[in-house]
Image (tube, helix red, strand yellow):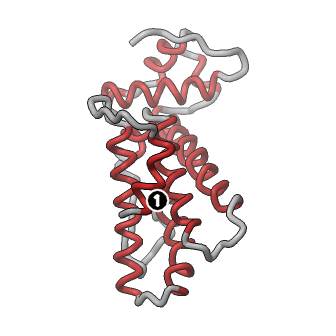
Amino acid sequence: MQNRQYHHGDLRNSLIEAGIELINREGTSQLSLRKVAALCGVSQAAPYSHFQSKEDLQDAIRDYVIVQFMEVLENSIKDCTDQNNPRLLIQMGKNYVMFFIKNPQYFPFVFSQQCMEVNLSLDGDDTRNFPPFQLLKTKAVPILSKLGMSKEKMEDAIISMWATVHGLASIATMKNVHYNKDWETKIEDIIWNK
């Protein structure tokens, strides 16, 4: 790993990005404040002004990525004038995939976390549900209800929607997968034609 210089005043985010890089290369067990400090080219004491422990850094990394991811998904909702239009779900799916195409280092990090939970069922406790998936459920249920779907079919449709965009994001972020078309222009076609 090569050292990177952080921009003055942005050490916290530089440490978080270095932590993501370290976890993706060496695994969560190898994360340490000392190692992220070395990656950022700062003293071993510098991270302690932002994080109390390795676990605190790991929580901050997870929150940092989820906040950015949710912001992208919420912006797709804000941009849609008709909240009951099925196209809203297409746009959310497109933004889901594009978030990871633009930030491929986040995909393996987010989905390797043991604390990340996804409740696929429409019943049950959603308080600990993965926020992007919970947002999909929240937006999809009224749209699919208006289409006359039963609860069982809605659940199947939501799982299918998530599997499609999650699978596309996984494929698009793999270093050994090549595609000669522009993902951004093709994602909607792929989702729509599913």
Above or below: residue 104 compared with residue 142: above
Q: Judge the density around disc 1: few (<14), some (14-19), many (≥20) Cα neighbours within 10 Å.
A: some
Q: What residue do we see at 43% from left, 87% from top?
A: 149
Q: What residue do we see at 49% from left, 57% from top?
A: 93
Residue in the foreground of this view, choosing between 17 and 34 = 17
Residue in the foreground of this view, choosing between 93 and 15 = 93
Above or below: residue 163 compared with residue 137: above
- The quadrant in which residue 112 appears is top left
Q: What residue do we see at 54% from left, 30% from top?
A: 16
Location of mark 1 (residue): 130
Above or below: residue 59 compared with residue 17: below
Q: Amino acid at mark 1?
A: Phe
Q: Position of residue 144 (x, y in %)?
A: 49, 81
Q: Position of residue 159 (x, y in %)?
A: 36, 69
Please state if 63 lies on the left or on the right of 116 as rendered.
Answer: right
Residue in the foreground of this view, choosing between 12 and 122 = 122
> Which quarter of the figure is the C terminus placed in?
bottom left
Q: Secondary structure at mark 1?
A: loop
Please state if 137 lies on the left or on the right of 166 as rendered.
Answer: right
Q: What residue do we see at 72% from left, 67% from top?
A: 81
> Which quarter of the figure is the N terminus placed in?
top left
Q: Position of residue 15 (x, y in %)?
A: 55, 24
Q: Position of residue 117 (x, y in %)?
A: 39, 60
Furthest-left residue in view? 176
